[in-house]
Image (cartoon, rainbow, N blue to C red):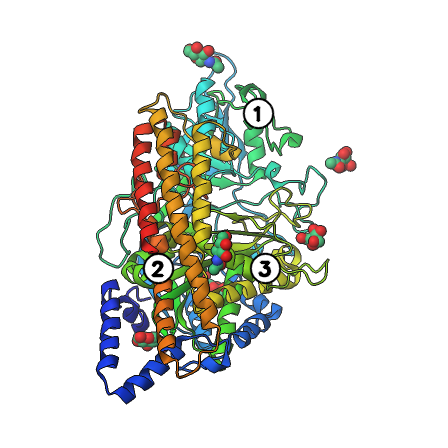
Amino acid sequence: MDSNEQTPLIATVRVRPPRQRYSHNVVRRFCTIALGSSLIALTVLFLLPVAFLPGHHNHYRPRPKSIAFEKLQAIILDTPKEEKAQEWSKYYTSGPHLAGKNYSQAVWTQERWDEWGIKSGIVAYDVYINYPLDHRLALYENKKKGKGDVDSWKVKFEASLVEDVLEEDPTTGLEDSIPTFHGYSASGNVTAPYVYVNYGTYQDFEDLINANISLAGKIAIAKYGGIFRGLKVKRAQELGMVGTILFTDPGDDGLATEENNVTTYPKGPARNPSSVQRGSAQFLSVAPGDPTTPGYPSKPGVPRQPVEGVIPSIPSIPISYVDAIPILKALNGHGPSSKDMNQHWERNQGLKYKGVDYNVGPSPDDLVLNLVNEQEYVTTPLWNVIGIINGTLPDEVIVIGNHRDAWIAGGAGDPNSGSAALNEVARSFGVALSQGWKPLRTIVLASWDGEEYGLVGSTEWVEEYLPWLSHANVAYVNLDVATVGPTFHASASPLLNRLLYEVTSLIPSPNQTVPGQTLGDVWDGKIRTMGSGSDFTAFQDYAGVPSIDFGFGPNPEDPGNTGGAVYQYHSNYDSYYWMNKYGDPGFHYHVATAKLFGLFTAKLAETPVIPLNATDYAIALEGYISNVESKLSGTAEEDEMEVRARPTPIGSKGDIEDLKLSFKKLHKAAKKLKKAAQAHDAWATELAEQAGQDIPWWKWYSKLKLYWNIRKVNTRYKFLERQFLYPKGLDGRPWFKHIIFAPGLWTGYAGAVFPGLVEAIDAKDYGVAQKWVGIIESSLFKAAGSLK
Ligand SMILES: *[C@@H]1O[C@H](CO)[C@@H](O)[C@H](O)[C@H]1NC(C)=O
Ligand SMILES: *[C@@H]1O[C@H](CO)[C@@H](O)[C@H](O)[C@H]1NC(C)=O
Ligand SMILES: *[C@@H]1O[C@H](CO)[C@@H](O)[C@H](O)[C@H]1NC(C)=O
Ligand SMILES: *[C@@H]1O[C@H](CO)[C@@H](O)[C@H](O)[C@H]1NC(C)=O
Ligand SMILES: *[C@@H]1O[C@H](CO)[C@@H](O)[C@H](O)[C@H]1NC(C)=O
Ligand SMILES: *[C@@H]1O[C@H](CO)[C@@H](O)[C@H](O)[C@H]1NC(C)=O
Ligand SMILES: *[C@@H]1O[C@H](CO)[C@@H](O)[C@H](O)[C@H]1NC(C)=O
């Protein structure tokens, strides 16, 4: 396979003129028109605005011809079909498609899109990545009886490290299924006593230090959950531990557990006891993407940076709860019990009924683990599939994407429920194109590779096309796990909130217990902030492109009860069989997602005045500022896991009272931004109304003025999010440029807002916090100015 493979289509995209040339072009265009013969000028002036005004109204019949929005909407809502989504799901989940390992799935995707009328190509990057070779986990016991006896080490337990093959589920029996392992994990062979470290959060480790548990030289065994897995390995490594084992505790599965007599998969919805969560151990909150090329694309031959500090140096492996039980039980009676620690250690202990006391350890010297992890590291191509539908306005671009790669041969939920929905959107757009649709804005479709290892395919692509995206990208719409349950969830830049409320109210809910309900009716309406964890990260946090991510998941409070089945994330049981039986029987939620994804994109691409709302952003910012302020005064309500993920500072630096006073500046700046945003949105509303009215042909000048004003308003919307980028990036992690959104340093997922400021406050470094107040203040002023 040719890693240099690049379509002419993509090459064109790359050489698009920078921003300044745009205004130059406009001027030139205007001059040509003005200086032409009056007859031609009149005609051109009349046709120009007509060409770009909405297709909603027949009297604006656009040139080039397009179809009315009502018709486009009907196509988007009518085209996606359950059988088709099933077909795509079946295809993607019928063989392994680990990052860089399945070129034929990239080609297949490209061929389908082409077939449906969307010109597409494959964009390859040469990335540094690991593949599993071997692993072992065994518990050794020294049976030496008395003082003078010789050592007599015996294997007390040998972990299987494989998931059960199930007769009902053909995916689980594939010959070429992918072993259980961690992406970007370090190779190693260590034998040592071990310590149970709860969830392995920063505070869990602090609790162990405070309880005088010796950690150096030991192996950590941690529960999955709460924070990004790589950060558990990171902290263990920093404390001198020599290996990390991560297990899935059924205590985190809500009510649908074996303990509650809920039948396990495949006979029932509870977790199969042998289920293993694979996943990346990269230090995601430091930088995503290829760890050897931070900030630039992994093209063949580029210089490579050392990977220390970005990926682990101690070995780690994931295991099932079946494999964890004997290891945890062997700790019974050793070291403090969870009760001796604190209440955070006592939650969700799902293996007590199996005789596990959850003692901390360490295991005595005659009880040790041998952990072997053998990984092959290579620099190898991976393949993004990129499709383009040229719009009338080449400098206003909507990008939509989903990743294709999975940890397992299946991946029916993660990510291929999203891939099936994306294909249904592509097919719908194809139908619209065949009926004469010519979008106002350019739409780019992306099927990313390498997301699982650390958002690799999307990050490298954004790094490569940054100049063009900075100039032209209006928004990015992401779909990862589209559906593994009935509960809708979303996170977004506040600019996009309003559009999400609007579009969810237009999509019928697949749950018609109450007939006629829309998605909006069955959703709690909460929109979370953007952190990391999927392919929107490079767009939102690095390029300053307003982004959104949504999908259906289990009910987080109660995955097994109202929420249907437990989602066996990153395991062999995320299979087509599971999806069809438990995740989304009948694939109705797949279809609902495709409709939402398609219509959301179409509204972004077609509405003459871009449907972003600056006021909502300003209001959100006021809220974030108040939250940080109450955090500073100790009155904030905070998420337990976020608190547990945070380092406790020893002393404080700088003056807290000064910092408190400086919040006045932030409130003032936010107020100024809100004022500018309100004026801007009001103008946008006015223009949208005008665009919807019938302007007689002889008022060509009004039409022209309206067109230029809409372009002006849209350009300001387009660049608003970019104002929140700080070129030097966050302290200690300069890849992250956004001053409002970033993954939490020690959670790795959606984090606190104003990361620079909040981390400084957490560290009680009020001087650095002051610096960030200044940075935020000037960003808010800059944003306000950009709307004038
Ligand atoms: C690639 O994916 C296809 C379709 O899922 C599958 O049939 C094939 O075995 C996979 N190829 C490799 C090399 O794993
Ligand atoms: C899109 O437009 C560019 C230039 O504006 C052109 O080179 C390219 O071929 C077009 N692509 C499609 C799919 O029409
Ligand atoms: C791990 O190291 C031990 C002790 O050096 C050795 O006996 C064993 O063969 C090694 N295991 C593997 C899989 O290399
Ligand atoms: C840990 O050790 C220190 C110093 O030896 C001692 O003061 C403290 O009480 C110990 N803490 C616990 C929880 O055992
Ligand atoms: C599960 O079944 C066992 C045996 O029938 C019973 O003792 C136990 O109470 C049940 N547990 C629950 C939560 O229903
Ligand atoms: C379906 O909707 C009804 C009514 O809104 C609700 O009570 C029920 O929990 C929903 N079912 C699922 C599986 O979401
Ligand atoms: C933008 O949001 C504000 C505040 O939420 C609202 O009052 C206004 O009507 C919205 N404007 C548009 C154009 O959506």
- Find out whether the residues at labels 2 and 1 contact each other: C-beta distance under 8 Å: no
Q: Secondary structure at mark 1?
A: helix
**Numbered label attached to residue 716:** 2
Closer to us: mark 3 or mark 2? Answer: 2
> Relative to 533, is 290 on the left or the right?
left
Q: Nearer the viewer, residue 132 or 614?
A: 614
The x, y position of residue 772, in whole percent, is 32, 37
Query: Considering depth in this image, is 602 or 677 the residue closer to the camera?
Result: 677
Amino acid type at image mark 3: Tyr
Mark 3 neighbour density, 10 Å: few (under 14) some (14–19) many (20 or more): many
- Say which residue appears at 50% left-offset and 18% top-offset: 144
Q: Is residue 416 above or below residue 212?
A: below
Residue plotted at (24% across, 80% down): 34
Look at the numbered disc 2 and say if its residue's Cβ is closer than 8 Å to ligand 7: no
80 to 43, vertically: above or below: above
* x and y, in percent, of residue 335 in the image: 52, 19
Q: Quadrant of residue 665?
A: top left
Residue at numbered disc 1? 343
Q: Which mark is residue 693?
A: none
Real-space Cα distance between discs 3 and 2? 45 Å
Which label was assigned to residue 576? 3
Spot occupied by residue 451 in the image (x, y as percentages of width and height): 42, 54
Along the line of sight, which residue is nearer the eye, 333 or 588?
Answer: 588
Q: Position of 543 compared to 251: left or right?
A: left
Q: Quadrant of the C terminus?
A: bottom left
- Between the C-alphas of marks 3 and 1, the distance is 39 Å
**Mark 3 or mark 1: which is in front?**
1
Determine the secondary structure under disc 3. helix
Task: Look at the numbered disc 2 and give the secondary structure of its residue.
Answer: helix
In the image, 73: left or right of 270? left
Task: Give the residue type at disc 1.
Answer: Gln
Q: Earlier in the sequence, mark 2 or mark 1?
A: 1
